[in-house]
Amino acid sequence: MAEPRPPLTLAARVLGAVLLILLLGGVLVSGSAWLNGQQAARQAYDRILLGAARDIAESVRVQEGVPAADLPVSAFQLLAQAPDDRIYYAVHGPGQAFITGVDPESEVQVPPPGSGGPDYFEAPLNGEPARFVRITRRFAERSFSGPVEVVVGQTLRARKAMTSDLMLDALLPMAVAGLALMAMAWLVIRTALRPLEDITDDLARRDPYDLTPIATGRLPRELQVVLGAMNRFMGRLDTQVEAMRNLISDTAHQLRTPVAAMRVQAETAVAEPGEAARRRALERLLARTRSLGRLLDQLLSRALVAHRTDSAPRRPVDLREVALEIMERDDHALLAPGSDLRLEIGEDPVMVLADAFSLGEAAGNLLGNALRHGTPPVAIGAEQRGREAILWVRDAGPGPAPAVTEQLGSRFNRSAGTQENSTGIGLSIVASVAAAFGGRVEMANEDSGFRAALVLPAAEEKP
Amino acid sequence: MMRAWQMLLLIAALLPVPAAAQEAAVRYGSGPVPFLIRSTTDNSVIQPVMERFAELNPDLTITYEQWGSNALFARSRADCRDGSPPADAVLSSAVQQMVWLVNAACAQPHRSPATVVLPPSRRWRDELWGITTEPAVIVYNKRLLDGADVPRSRFALLDALRAKPGLYRGRIATYDIAASGLGYLFAYSDSLEATTFGALMEGFARVDAVATCCSAEIIAGVAEGRFLIAYNVLGSYVANASAPEVGTILPEDYTLVLSRAFMIPKHAAQRGASAELLDFLLSAEAQEMLVKAGLVAVIEETGSGLTASARRYIPLSPSLLVALDANRRALLLKFWSDTFGQGATP
């Protein structure tokens, strides 16, 4: 039932990671500083202990066969370098015979003798932890022979103080450096993330219907990639929305007049008393209906083309196959029954990178226009000219009026008097296909007639 | 054989007067809480200070026990070892013994603004504090010794002993270091300070100097004219002896300065009151009273021209453990008795 935490900001994550790294480093450095400090303090004060023990051992004299220590004050002044520490010392002759010591009644447990060098050991001294050194001086006098053992010890206050001093000395600059690093990290992170924040702000402030591209200038490359992708996506969305809006408005516009005309003709047919006249009216109504069906087909085709040119992946397409497919469709037979249709294609493939369906629609429209408005014979073909691949339709007529050619590519021909004439829409489909695949529409009067062509950049030959 | 001799020395050093109890006990105040001080300071000297403290702490009944330093040391040591209830505060002039007790973990710490400002020589481990300032002085009989003959330093004293051995024969006094803890401490400190110590001992021996145990006897002897000069007498005793014939000299070569040490035993029942007593003793008011009592000598104002470098404070430091060391003591006593002949050894 844990409350889901709000997601952390990027800056917080990075800063948190930096802080964690610094903290871990700090712990490691503290540990090592402490160890170093402890070692340094131990060495320093062990030397003092050893020096004092040597002084005391040196002061042992044998007088009348009895060893006695003329305790040197210097040894104790040495030990007083640790001013607040308790001191222990004891001098023993052979067989642990007590010679002198700070307190014969409470002696420290001395470990068994080691190698003979100075032995350091730790033991409690009057209930406080302390460190000791034991050295042995061997006498070989006429009156006395044997080892004299000196044990000197000291509590650990000065060592601990020195350890913590050394540690603090080492850690203080580290702490300052850590803080400085933290501040710098914060600055760097802020600077690095500022573009991202700017984009975030831009997106947050943006109108949800605003599909204009986000400025990518002065952005880091990674962000430019992301933003570029996003801008392309928004651009496509924008185009689609626009296309949809156009489709709706076109459709409404194009359908209003034919539907009104049909209503009038239907009313005429109903009202006509004469059988022959009614029949004529009904035939006109039928023709209108057919024409309307064609118009709807084309509107749909254009919407499909508009959608596909935007979203369908580009694939290598042979324009000859497109032309062949159009030939084999039986649409033209419906448009112009018994017309003379020829196919003119070469041996070599004419390859473009495009969407086959869209090309088919464009070619179909070109062919439809030629069949409907041109003069037979009509020919369809594909050819490659230099770096351009051409899909063309030719008829023997003079071509459309210049006004129609001029309006080529506009979405629809509002001014066209022929309401149910779908030439305008057909050409606009061709024009948008050409634009989508980086080509153009060419219309030219040739010797043999009028030729309308879809010119596309040829694809690189693939082996 | 050897060990027995050593043990004997050791016992002589550490437990010289095992059975002796306090010399006197005085009671201050009548509050419900008993409070016990053991001290080596004469009650008559410290009385005003204790009265004032009792006045400030009406809930206490203060028992002030006056002890000999060795007996006090033995008692405190025994209390520390066997856990019997100790005194609530111990104040002793035998600072080496106090250092020993602190070193043996027989004391407890206390820190207060008053203790923190003490110089390091008068504070050790925050468990031992120097309360007083008492120089070791040379005293002389003003009547019998005219100005020119008054030795201002140890060198002058040595020269005088050489120049006029007849005048001083049998009329120089000093502590018997075997009998007096304080005398031993001064002799030990002298032995650290300068080689004059040896020469002085020889000089004393040549003129048959008298080694005696007690400050009062020495000062009285000087006042009466039995002694012309007494060496290493604690200045405070002179100040309290009210003997107008006795002059004091702070030796110009160096003057030892002793600070009586205050300690709160580890298992003291009234540690709070002990800490209060300590803070009170270090307060300006009590120090003023101690100046009047002669326990705090204002050396700067004596006009003796004693330079700061000539003042040798006997520091409360672990080095004083050497003074208590059995071997060291035996050697010093041996040197002493060798020099002084049979007259000095107990």
Image (spheres, coloured by chain):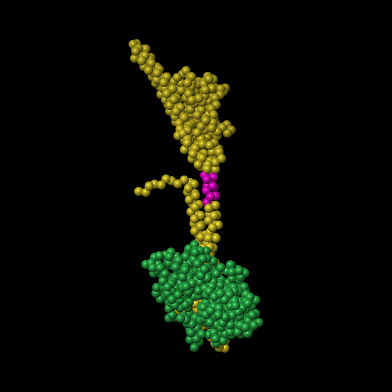
Instruction: Decide if residue A278 is on the left or right side of residue A189.
Output: left
Residue B9 versus residue B238 in the image, above or below: below
Q: Nearer the viewer, residue B9 or A391?
A: B9
Residue A191 versus residue B198 in the image, above or below: above
Instruction: Decide if residue B304 is on the left or right side of residue B84.
Output: right
Q: Which residues are magenta?
A: A182-193
Asked whether the viewer can see residue A455, the reply is yes
Most common SS among magenta residues: helix
Q: Is residue A377 magenta?
A: no
Colour of chain A, in one word, is yellow
**Residue A440, image x, y percentages:** 54, 29
* Residue at 38% from the left image edge and 68% from the top image edge: B30
Q: Nearer the viewer, residue B14 or A265?
A: B14
Output the letter for the chain in green: B
**Residue B287, image x, y percentages:** 51, 66
Residue A388 versus residue A39 in the image, above or below: above
Residue B98 versus residue A213 in the image, above or below: below
Q: Is residue A190 magenta?
A: yes
* Residue at 54% from the left image edge and 43% from the top image edge: A220
